[in-house]
Each structure stands twice: as C-alpha cells, then as structure tokens.
Image (cartoon, rainbow, N blue to C red):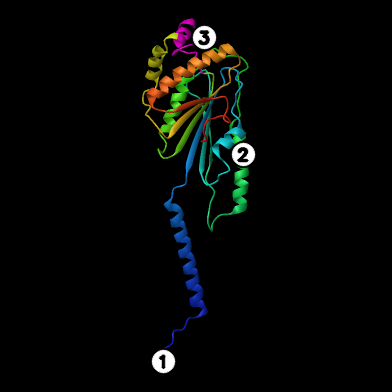
Amino acid sequence: MTNYLTITTQDYTMKTKLLFIIIILCLGACNSSEPTPSKTVSVLFDITDPLIAHPDASELYKLLDADNTNQNLHIRYGEISEVDFNPVSELIRPASKTGLLSNAVEEKQRMRGFGKDLEALLVRTDSLTPQDNSSIFLPIISEVKVLQSMDSTMDKTLIIYSNLMENNSLVSYYRYNDLWLLEHQPEVLLEKYLLKAKGINPSDSLRILFIYIPENDKANTQYQNLQQLYRMVFDRLGIPISFSANLTKAQKSL
C-alpha cells in the first residue's frame, strides 16, 4: 500500500500563520539589535537682561535635524533668573515606528505636531530692564550635572542664551572690582568658578553652545572678556564649548 502525505487547507492556513508570526518576531529582533539614536538638547534663556538673541523654534528644529524621525528627541527648556534654581519644562519625541506594525498616517501627524509643541515649549518672558540680581553660572552647572547623569551614549547639547553678566554673591560684573578682575586677572575669577563646579566630569558626549548678540561696543568688549573666562573654566572642566550669534551660524550641527 502506498502512503501519501496529505496537507489539508486547515493545515496550510495554520502553517502560514505560524510562518507569519516567525517573520514578525525575526524583524523585531533585527530592529532591536541596533539601538535607536537618541539626542537631548537643553535650552537655558537668561531673562535678567534684555537680549537681542532669543530661542527660536525654527532654528532649533533645523539644528536638531528633527525631520529625521529615526531618532529619539528630548528637549529641556529653563530660564535663568535672579535665583539659582528654576523650573524646567520638557518635550519628548520618540523615534517613528518602523516595519509592519507602523502606521504612516499616524506617524506623519505626530511629526507635524512636534513643531507646534516645540514652539509652545519655548515660551519666554524676557526682561524689559535689567534685574537687580542675575545668577547665571550656577544654573548652567546644575543643568550640566543633569545632562551628565543621562546615558553616556546619548548625544547631549546645552544651548545658553545669555550675556553672562553675573550679578550675585559669587561675582558681580556691575561692580568695578570684579569687572577689573575680569579684564586684568581672570585667573582669580577662574578659581571662584571652579569651586562652584565641583562634581563636573570631563565629557565628549556633551557640548555647550553660547548664543549672544552684543547691543553695542561696550557690551561686545565685556562679552569677549567673558568668553575668555568661560573658555578657561570649561577647558579645565574638560567640556567643549563654542560661541555664536545664533543657531544658524553654529559651527556644527547637533
């Protein structure tokens, strides 16, 4: 008697379903084998003095390369004020889903909404006149510590809009003595700053970008001196920094 192997329609359907499930699992395993790129950008805006340069959502969107949806984006926004500690708002955009489980229509809608969410996040209350006090360096150091506590593989950038004109118990560049030190003996101020920066570690995954447009020649000279001091400070801390008039002119993309 000859034996025949019989495959019924029900068996074929079941095997097809199993094969489909296996393919999905394999695709999921392939996708999970490579971590999704993640980027964190923190923006600090100094509201203690009127500034020409302000956080701009369209500039930040371009610098983030936000049209690249294959990356996780984490945006933090805080204001620099008269006090050392200020609230921070956050916006998180996960990378778009890929593969068989993705929904192209939903992903497009979600990405379009990110631009509006970014604009809403960067709501600012700029000062019309200089405030009596201005704490700048300590909020910067606090935010650096937050960023350094995150995953070391994550790309992190701190963007600071400020004239860096400190006016508090640490130092005041509205007093003659401190302004003289800034111009003639910045190494004295360097030690003061470094004392407030304890706990900061050298980092290649974090960079700091300072944004400022001087309103006149006097402000330009003061800012050049402050640039020199900040370069000295962060060179000792081992964190790369750069200065620019706006994000569009920043030397390299995030």
Assign the N terminus to one quadrant of the image: bottom left
Is tag 1's residue or tag 2's residue first in the polypeptide sequence?
A: 1
Query: Residue, x 47% and y 64% (percent of image)?
Result: 23
| Residue 228, position as x, y percentages in the image | 46, 18
Amino acid, disc 2: Gly
Q: Find out whether residue 180 is within the magenta segment.
A: yes
Position of residue 197 relative to residue 70, above or below, is: above
Distance from label 3 to label 2 (Cα)? 39 Å
Which residue was labeled with disc 3? 174
Q: Relative to 238, is 72 on the left or the right?
A: right
| Residue 186, position as x, y percentages in the image | 42, 13
| Element at label 1 | loop
Query: Residue, x 49% and y 11% (percent of image)?
Result: 173
Q: Residues within 10 Å of mark 3 (few under 14, many from 20)?
A: few
Distance from label 1 to label 2 (Cα)? 70 Å
| Residue 22, position as x, y percentages in the image | 45, 64
